[in-house]
Each structure stands twice: as structure tokens, then as C-alpha cells.
Image: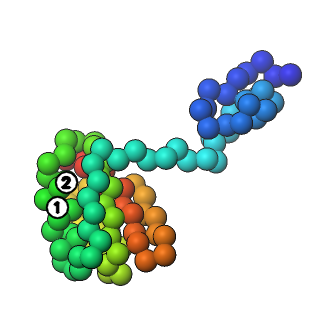
Amino acid sequence: MNEKQCNCPYCEPEVKENLADLCSPCSIEPEIKADEVLDCTGLYCPAPVFETRKKIDTLKKNQILLMVSDDPASEEDMKAWAKRTGNEIMSIEKDRDVFKFFIKKIS
């Protein structure tokens, strides 16, 4: 058995015990934890962008906002807004017609 142990909190115990010479990056991504949640369901362009801007302004640097929207245009709108403002979209999830945007405040 290899003496090296994986310290990754996401690997299964048998993976931790049977590593090669180097631990490879884990394929399981940690769940993103939001500091604040903004529900924009039922709002349509440009309201989700305006509401996100107002909410992100209340956050501290590096905090994460989860914005939920069912506006079909929100994915492209939020990508453009993040590029324009310098904030980071960490993840976009879509479940049926609902988007979840995890946005990190950069400045």
C-alpha cells in the first residue's frame, strides 16, 4: 500500500488509500456555498440584471451571490453583465426553465 494519503474531502476512502505516486485532482467539484440568494423568478429583461447589480453592491469582495431566474434571456444577459462589471460567474446551472447563477463579487 502506498504511504501517501489524499487529503481531499471529496474522495472515497478506498481512493484515499490506493493512490499512485501523486494525487490527481479530484473529479468531484465541491458544492458552491452562496453568501446571499436573490430570487428573480418571474422577472424579465432587464430586471434580473438590475436586481443582481443592486444585490451584488451590498456584498463584500469575494462573497458569492446565488441568483435564480426563469428569464430565457438571463444566461446571455448575466454573462454580458459579468464581463462588463468584472464580477465572476462561477457556475451556471439549469434545471428545466430555471437558471442558477453563482456570482463572485470581485471588486
Residue at 29% in and 54% down: 37
Asked if residue 24 shows in the view, the reply is yes
Q: Element type at marker 1?
A: helix
Residue situated furthest top in the rendering: 3
Q: For the residues labelled 1 and 2, say whether their Cβ atoms are less than 8 Å apart.
A: yes
Which amino acid is tagged 1?
A: Arg
Q: Which of the 4 quarters of the picture holds residue 66?
A: bottom left
Asked if residue 76 shows in the view, the reply is no
Identify residue for label 1: 53
Whole-percent x and y of residue 2? 81, 22
Residue at 15% in and 68% down: 50
Identify residue for label 2: 56
Which amino acid is tagged 2?
A: Ile
Identify the disc placed on residue 97.
none
Residue at 21% in and 69% down: 49
Q: Element type at marker 2?
A: helix
Quadrant placement of the N terminus: top right
Whole-percent x and y of residue 63? 28, 43
Compared with 33, 39 (above or below) is below
Whole-percent x and y of residue 105? 25, 49
- Compare residues 68 and 46 and report the one nearer the observer: 68
- Mark 1: few/some/many CA within 10 Å (<14, 14-19, 20+): some
Whole-percent x and y of residue 4? 73, 21
Residue at 62% in and 26% down: 7
On the picture, is 91 further left or further right than 16? left
On the picture, is 83 further left or further right than 33? left
On the picture, is 3 further left or further right than 46? right
CA–CA distance in space, label 1 to label 2: 5 Å
